[in-house]
Amino acid sequence: MSDAILAPTAAPPRAPGIWRQSWYRFRRNRAGMIGLCIVTLVVLLAILAPFIAPYVPDDTSAMLRGAARRPPSALHWLGTDRNGYDVFTRTLYGARTALMVGLGAMLIASVIGVLIGGIAGFSGGLVDELLMRFAEFFMVIPVFVVILAVVRLFGIVVVGTWMEDIPNLNMMTIIVLLGCFEWPPIARMARAEFLRLRGAEFVEAAHCIGSSRRDILLRHILPNAMPPLIVLVALGIGGAILAETMVSFLGFGDPKAVSWGQSLFFNYEALKVAPWAVLSPGAALFVTVLGFNLLADGLTDAFNPRLRQ
Amino acid sequence: MGTARYIARRLIFSLCLIIGVSIILFTMINAIGNPIEVLLAERPGITEEMIQAVTEYYGLHGSVTDRYFTWIWALLRLDFGTSIIYNLPVSEMLVTYGLETLKIQVPAILIALCVSVLISVLAATRQYSRVDFGVIAGAMVGHSLPGFLLGIILILVFSYTLGILPSYGAYSTRNPLWGSDMADALWHMVLPVGMLVFFNCATLTLLLRSSLVDVLRQDFITAARASGLPERRVVFGHALRNAFIPVLTYLGILFGLMLGTAPVTETVFTWPGLGALYIMAIQQLDYPLIMGATMVITVMLVTATLLTDIAYVAIDPRIRLG
Amino acid sequence: MLSTLASASSPVTAAPPAPLLEVRDLRVHFFVREGVVRAVDGVDFRVNPGETLGIVGESGSGKTVSSMSIMRLVPPPARNVGGQILFEGEDLLAKTPDEMEALRGRRIAMIFQNPATSLNPIYSIGAQLGEILRWHLKLSRAEADARVVELLTLVGISDPATRLRQFPHELSGGMKQRVGIARALLCNPSLVLADEPTTALDVTIQAQILELLADLQARLKMSMVLVTHDMGVVARMAHRITVMYAGRVCESADAATIFNAPQHPYTRALLESMPRIDQSYTGTKRQPLPTIAGRPPNLLNPPPGCRFHDRCPEASAECRRLLPLETTIAPGHSVSCLKRGSEGIAA
């Protein structure tokens, strides 16, 4: 073989990559853009909460003034709740907790899911069968009910041990639990993608030019398996935020945390007299979940042009 | 025949699931420590007899495996033990409360199914019209609105503001509506069932509409039209049945979601169902009740999944091969 | 290939009989966001009783849309914007939806391109064919089953009683297409529309299905519109041929005339681009297979003049300006080309 063959030829103009193309398509998707705007807004409000909020989150001075459970006013934009907290401030800070829960839980779920799905898809055979049955098992059991029980029991067990001193232990437990129960959809998708990509021509081409296994996995398969996983993660963040709110609403949350679920739990009994204290965190939860759902919807369309009508 | 084998396989998997959950549940409870000690941790006033009863029921003298089999053997005889807080047979309580839960959930999913079919057909046969766009937007919003929030809004509107529907409970303590227990029960069901219908309907419509749009574009639909079948038969007979196949899985998942979040629904409406009972049980650490309720919820869920699997065979002939 | 050409050239051309179907100046446009796509823009053709009309054209020429509009089944955003479709003397475009429903499947039936997707996967063969009979002819279940078995036998399916209870996924592609043909013939329609009935099949199966169609056509004396892009297929099957290009008709004539004395430059180019058995394409004396240079015009904003002008070897300045109208140059032979004496209108 002469060197002429290996001589570099003029590189053709680079076609826009999959990410850039997806972004072009995403920009045209109205639902997706609304979702992106909502999510961006929630993130900004969460970050800037200390600068926007008129009070500090555990300020109960309204209570001392006898101004608890007051309807919205110039002093308290969304009113005060039964503990004398400023509802607007609590709702704003609640976004921080919500995002932390959503991102934390999905980070854990993604790591577990991609690992298990990847191993199943890459090894195949009995390992694959067993891991997928395991995932299916997690998808059928009543996850929410189990989480409630574990949170409660764990709260008792730690009493008197070193773990008691961990700050926000209760919230951490919930995040870890949500992560540990939300991985199966990700694992299934990761497995399907790994199976699809393992046989793809460009992966075989990479094998042929002698790329290492690690290189193929990390540089060829993983990036291409990302799009559908990102959609699942976006959906999962909304789901995890909702789950945490429900756990807290039932009274199994972290009593010290400033979260929407906690506000709902504290104020639900006073729904009749102070509905604003319930509706505000409720509306915040709804808008956030809607934002992530719309975002996921737009991403699905952007990544799968064939599915677009 | 293939169908029988398929169902048998799913049946065995369901059984494995139930056994798996029972093992996990048992291990979890035991990993935490001696149930008695945990019990005593938050209940200093517990009597010696109660401890005795619990010890007896779980065979706490034996090893962990012994205890597991003692428990399973009792379950198989439908002996769920006695509730610590209520001092009643757990099996009896589970039936009473379980029926209350099913009373709102089964009608809810059936009504939701019918309504979403009608809405989906309306939207899918008018793709890209204003009706279609409105349905998509409404379903997306409804799908993102957590059920319990909707419940709270319904209570605020219909109970507190309009005062026409009860906000809590399954029955009036006295003076039932129109002097009829039946009417009274239905009256109390309106809000919780309405909330569950809306929640399920939004998700089902979202799925069914897009599935129906896909199916309506298929050749066999044009072929059915070209054969002169009336549009009503083409849509309901040919398109809808095909469109249902991908939605079927979600029907099982949806029922599971509804059952799994029953604690939330029933807290919002103070409904005396399995979910509310379960919350009570874990708050009070009523072991027999926790384990009994978890097992019953699992069995209900697994049954729903199994029914979905069987429905697949009934609706899609291609399944029988696989 | 030559021998097949001969077999098709046996038309019954005495005085033209009253046509079974006559399409006049049909226009079907697609109304999309970017504008109006003139997929079918003034098309005429006719089908005589007992005769097969082949509509030939490349993809996008409007041949499929034309046949779907006979059924009044063009899907939105396409809409019929003009013309007449006279079937047994009645204008189909003037009929109510109910009248069309009664007509479809009973007097006009259709055979689809892809047998894998044109049968409903969740109904048994007997169920989906029987449903049509029970609806149109009000047959009982048993009568319908008997009729379906009869037709399955007619289209050459072995053991029809068993097939009745089978589902589409249990049949082979060729078998499914036979079922599709049986479905079209259920109610003894006077006109059958076949849209690329063999394109999705294996080559060996294609021949069998074509043979079956030709045989059925002759035996049942039915009229057929055969839509295809394949000159070989029309050569075997059609008595008359209409050549379409970019939503308009180029040339219509009986099969022998089209193959032996084509007039329109597009028809000629199409025939020249067919591989010939007496021509070597390999070896030292090989010649390249002629192709038609260029590509069909964008029908969203078609250029003025003849639709074929930018690919036509004979095009002149007026071809770029005037749209040729269809002109009869001999009995039963019409062509639309300014170079063949067609009148042109500015468009």
Image (cartoon, rainbow, N blue to C red):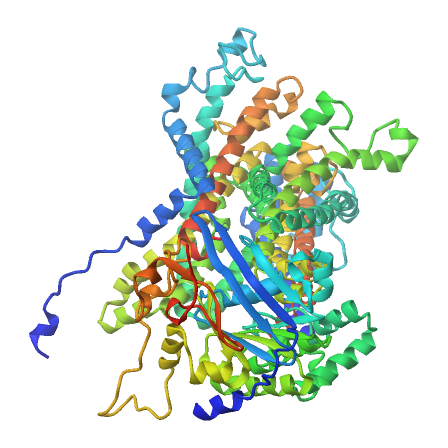
> Of residues C100 and B239, which is closer to you in this image?
C100
Q: Relative to B270, does residue C257 appear above or below in the rendering?
A: below
At horizontal 42% and vertical 79% (from top left) the residue drawn is: C262
In this rendering, position of residue A260 left or right of residue B258: left
Q: Residue at the top extreme?
A: A65
Q: Return the x and y of residue A219 as percentages of the image width and height.
A: 27, 59
Q: Quadrant of the N terminus of chain B?
A: bottom right
Q: Return the x and y of residue A176 as percentages of the image width and height.
A: 45, 44
> Of residues C317 and B170, which is closer to you in this image?
C317
Residue C82's quadrant in the figure? bottom right
Residue B201 seen in render: yes
The mark tally for this picture is 0
Q: Residue at the left extreme?
A: A3
In this rendering, position of residue B303 left or right of residue C256: right
At horizontal 41% and vertical 38% (from top left) the residue drawn is: A36
Q: Relative to C12, does residue B120 appear above or below in the rendering?
A: above
Q: Relative to B298, does residue B184 appear above or below in the rendering?
A: above
Q: Return the x and y of residue C280 as percentages of the image width and height.
A: 30, 91
Residue B310 seen in render: no
In this rendering, position of residue A275 left or right of residue C98: left
> Of residues C109 and A254, which is closer to you in this image?
C109
Q: Relative to B175, does residue B263 appear above or below in the rendering?
A: below
In this rendering, position of residue B215 left or right of residue B85: left
Q: Return the x and y of residue A40 as percentages of the image width and height.
A: 39, 34
Q: Quadrant of the C terminus of chain B?
A: bottom right
